[in-house]
Image (tube, rainbow, N blue to C red):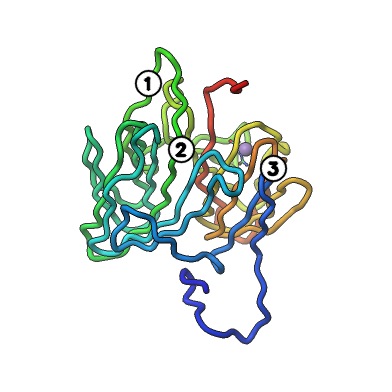
Amino acid sequence: MGYLNDQLGYREELLMTRSVIKKENYVILEPDGLVKNIVPGYDDCDVTILGSPAMGASFADYLVTAHAGGSNTGIGGEGIESFLYVMEGSLVVKNNDTEAELKAGGYIYSPADNPITFENKSKEDAKLYVYRRRYEKLDGYEAYTVVGNTNDLPWVEYEGMENCHIVDFLPKELGFDMNMHILSFKPGASHGYIETHIQEHGMYFLSGKGMYRMDDEWIPIKKGDYVFMDAYCPQACYGVGKDEEFAYIYSKDCNRDVQL
Ligand code: UGY
Ligand code: MN
């Protein structure tokens, strides 16, 4: 079943998939094959769990379509920090200290003791990327609610390459144990080197096409795909195609020492 691409019933073609599952290494989920999951708290929403500890991730992330009137009674809290990004449509979000209407590009980060609720008060579907992770405290520092929109954030040249840009969603402060970013590559742009780092990533591809190196393979990736990369997974990409930038939102743990 492909509920995201309306592919229901028998097909003319053989059953095939671009998805690749290499647990504790990397995982690619293409939209065809994703199913709806019933997740308590979500009402009138289509929810797909993307990354999860079942594939090796220390976090869970979700693709959510909140229909008109759709809502959630609480994402995060009880030690779990949460983040919500609006890809399409609009949504009213609240936590214990903030209420905001988020339009496309809008986001909220909420600390571990402070769940996010939302309601889609518009007449259109809203498409969301949601992230949850157990917060790792650091004595003397705290995380706090951050609300913003990527259209208001500075896009900076990525590591000295003028055809590749990055935006950071959260402040670079030790209170935060993770950050969200968008990386955007013009066709022909690439990473400057193949990264091999301890941090994990969950990535949702927002636009364009690219060739992505994961572990020892080069694999085509496009808008609508999801990727999980575990710690130390070798990784880098080239943006390809004619005009459209190859862009993805991704999470990265940060600011903490290794637990021994
Ligand atoms: O921040 C990062 O680690 C990022 N450059 N990784 C990636 O795009 N695969
Ligand atoms: Mn990386």
Query: How many neighbours does mark 1 have within 10 angstroms: few (below 14), some (14-19), or many (20 or more)?
Result: some
Which one is closest to the eye, mark 2 or mark 1? 2
Mark 3 C-beta closer than 8 Å to ligand 1: yes
Which one is closest to the eye, mark 1 or mark 3? 1
Query: How many neighbours does mark 2 have within 10 angstroms: few (below 14), some (14-19), or many (20 or more)?
Result: many
Residue at image position (65%, 83%) is 13
Is residue 94 toward the left or the right of residue 166 in the image? left
Is residue 237 toward the left or the right of residue 43 in the image? right
Res 217 seen here: yes
Q: Residue 142 carries which label?
A: 1
Give the amino acid type for the residue marked by disc 3 in the picture.
Answer: Gln
Is residue 198 toward the left or the right of residue 109 in the image? right
Ligand 1 falls in which quarter? Answer: top right
Disc 2 designates what residue? 133
| Residues under numbered marks 2 and 1 in contact, where contact means CB atoms less than 8 Å apart | no
Give the amino acid type for the residue marked by disc 1 in the picture.
Answer: Glu
Residue at image position (65%, 68%) is 17
Q: Which of the two discs, 1 and 3, labels the residue nearer the N terminus? A: 1
- State the image coordinates of residue 143 (x, y, percent, origin top left): 37, 25
Marks 1 and 3, how far apart at CA: 31 Å
Which one is closest to the eye, mark 2 or mark 3? 2
| Residues under numbered marks 2 and 3 in contact, where contact means CB atoms less than 8 Å apart | no
Disc 3 designates what residue? 235
Residue 253 versus residue 236 in the image, above or below: above
Q: Give the quadrant of the C terminus.
A: top right
Residue at image position (55%, 44%) is 53
Q: Which of the two discs, 2 and 3, labels the residue nearer the N terminus? A: 2
Residue 249 versus residue 197 in the image, above or below: below
